[in-house]
Image: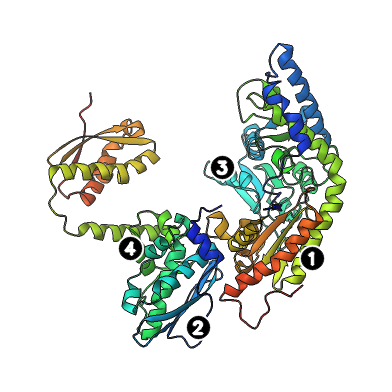
Amino acid sequence: MKIVYLDNNATTQVASEVMEVMLPYFHEFYGNPSSMHSFGGQVAQKIRVAREQVAALLGASAEEIVFTSCGTESDNAAIRSALATCPDKKHIVISRVEHPAVRALCAHLATHGYRITELPVDKNGLLDLEILDKNIGPDTALVSLMWGNNETGVLFPVQEAAVIAHERGVLFHTDAVQCAGKIPINLKNNLIDMLSLSGHKLHAPKGIGVLYIRKGTKFSPFLIGGHQERERRGGTENTPSIIGLGKACELAAHNMEKENKEVNRLRDKLERELLKKIPQSRINGDPTNRLPNTTNISFEYVEGEAILLLMNELGICASSGSACTSGSLQPSHVLRAMGVPFTMAHGSIRFSLSIYNTEEEIDFVIAQMPAIIERLRGMSPYWTDGKQACTSQ
Amino acid sequence: MWEYTDKVKDHFLNPHNVGEIKNPDGQAEVGSIACGDALKLTFKLDENKRIKEARFKTFGCASAIATSSALTDIIKGMTLEEALQVTNQDIAQYLGGLPQEKMHCSVMGKQALEKAIENYRGAPSLEMGAKIICECFGVTDKEIERAVRENNLATLEEVTNYTKAGGGCGSCHDAIQQIIDSVRSEKRLSPQSKLTNLQKIRLIEETIEREIRPSLKHDGGDIDLIDVIGNRVIVATRGACAVCKASDITLKHFVEHRLRELVSPDITVEEEVSK
């Protein structure tokens, strides 16, 4: 069965160009970049290039890039460093819709003497900067806000938020895991102190992440060990993945326009057609301030897991914010924070595209979804016979 | 991704008896759209008072749909007395098992069946006098008690898996724990037949392993059973317990208490005389 992969916010395919540059570094050039011999030294040279490539995508300089093992590690390192370097301050400001890498860590810190403020969002998932300003106090060590939301794609005004944090003398971190490679980022033009990204969201492999630390920002390492990464992250470098991530960043910069034109167009088409063909459906999240590749759509009176499993029968991959998919009993914290009614939240599906999706695939999904929703609505006690589940094509 | 059995998948993809019987003999609706699953069950009896036809409409995940489908298959041809004997475990077993987190779907099926039969009989609800414990999912004390009793549940997490109670805001966790404790203690009060020495030692071992060790380990401690002399249980404390000033209290108030409750009221617990 052909797979139609529309779950790119979960993870992406490693680009073939990326895999190609990685392969020699498993078996052939396996040297340790810290070694004195040139067999290892040649790998160090490649890591330098990769660091430049990552820096170029972010508008950063190479020494501001620290390689980590994943987005979660980067988030943890950033937040813990802010607390370690501001030992007198015990307050962190985040939002109610952060990724678990930030949210769960902060919940943990809350049991260890720190005070956490979770900023609310409006019904479109947007953040009010005035509320941010009001919630920063003399005790605040860090403001950490995600740039793009993984579930809805909604973008936060993090560059403006960084200005506000700086005016109050507070460090600013952003989880940009969903944004890197999808929207232009230029760290030369803003005041963001720390930024996290993850390789496998932009066609590099899993198990590699980056923490950007602005030059001059005090940093206290999370992983203490060897002198790697200028003593900011101990542990022998994941050389193939670092080299792969460098290539992936170069490709992402190259494909940025395609992402924002072509991927955006396919996303809009998918969204428009599904809303048109399937009544009682709606978009979750602000339609304009949004990543180009993501749409989160709720289908009322049906449940997300059931939708996903019927899609799965056709090889269509996506995600849901329903309670049943997570094993928890409540729908996604993001949709709840936005005040999406439970009747809608349980039937939410996230489609996230990449540059590798084709028009044909999107047309296939548009053609198949109405029947899936109709079939489940036909079984639902809330869907009365008088209503028409879907308009025929 | 959930690991559903082939039978669950089959009943989800090709559900049996979907729909609603017009003028049914019995009907019931349980669950709600806010809770994430809901089931409407209707049935009709034949001239011998056996269930001739049963149909369902379900809003919910794959396992909610599959358990509804299985339920209607199971009860077809049964008398109402027979149908009332069907447990949520029977429904789950019919499907070759359900993931623990999805057991509440089978409980929902069982509830719908009972309510539909009550509806037919016009009998007062079994749930008279029940009190809502979990506000988030509207679960009553009676429902929790039954789930604990019928499925031999021991922890809050299990209760949540089976009934959804406690899966929301969490403010009812203490109340749920109290129900678990009271149901489980009433079980133990049932006359404990006289144990042979070997049986007693085995039961003590089991109780320490299952009921005591996990909570000590949670606090960084541990305990070993050294000897059983009559009703004297000799133990050694380990880890954090071994150096804890309060370990005497732990032994008397927790370990001894549990063993008296679960094995025999005559038990005393002593710490091994230090080496």
C-alpha separation, residue under disc 1 versus residue under disc 3: 42 Å
Q: Earlier in the sequence, mark 2 or mark 4?
A: 2
C-alpha separation, residue under disc 2 versus residue under disc 3: 55 Å
What SS does tag 4 mark?
helix
Looking at the rendered structure, the kind of residue marked 2 is: Ile
C-alpha separation, residue under disc 2 versus residue under disc 4: 30 Å
On screen, B217 above or below B164?
above
Label 4: few (<14), some (14–19) or many (≥20) C-alpha neighbours in 10 Å: few
Residue bearing the label numbered 3: A109
Labels 1 and 4 in the same subunit? no
Residue A18, picture quadrant: top right
Looking at the rendered structure, the kind of residue marked 3 is: Leu
User: Percent x, y for residue A198?
Assistant: 70, 39
Looking at the rendered structure, the kind of residue marked 1 is: Arg
What SS does tag 2 mark?
loop
Labels 2 and 3 in the same subunit? no
Residue bearing the label numbered 1: A272
What SS does tag 3 mark?
helix
Residue bearing the label numbered 4: B150
On screen, A323 above or below A109?
below
Q: Residue at x 23, y 50 (%)?
A: B262
Labels 2 and 4 in the same subunit? yes
Colour scheme shown: rainbow
C-alpha separation, residue under disc 1 versus residue under disc 4: 49 Å
Labels 1 and 3 in the same subunit? yes
Q: Nearer the viewer, mark 3 or mark 4?
A: 4
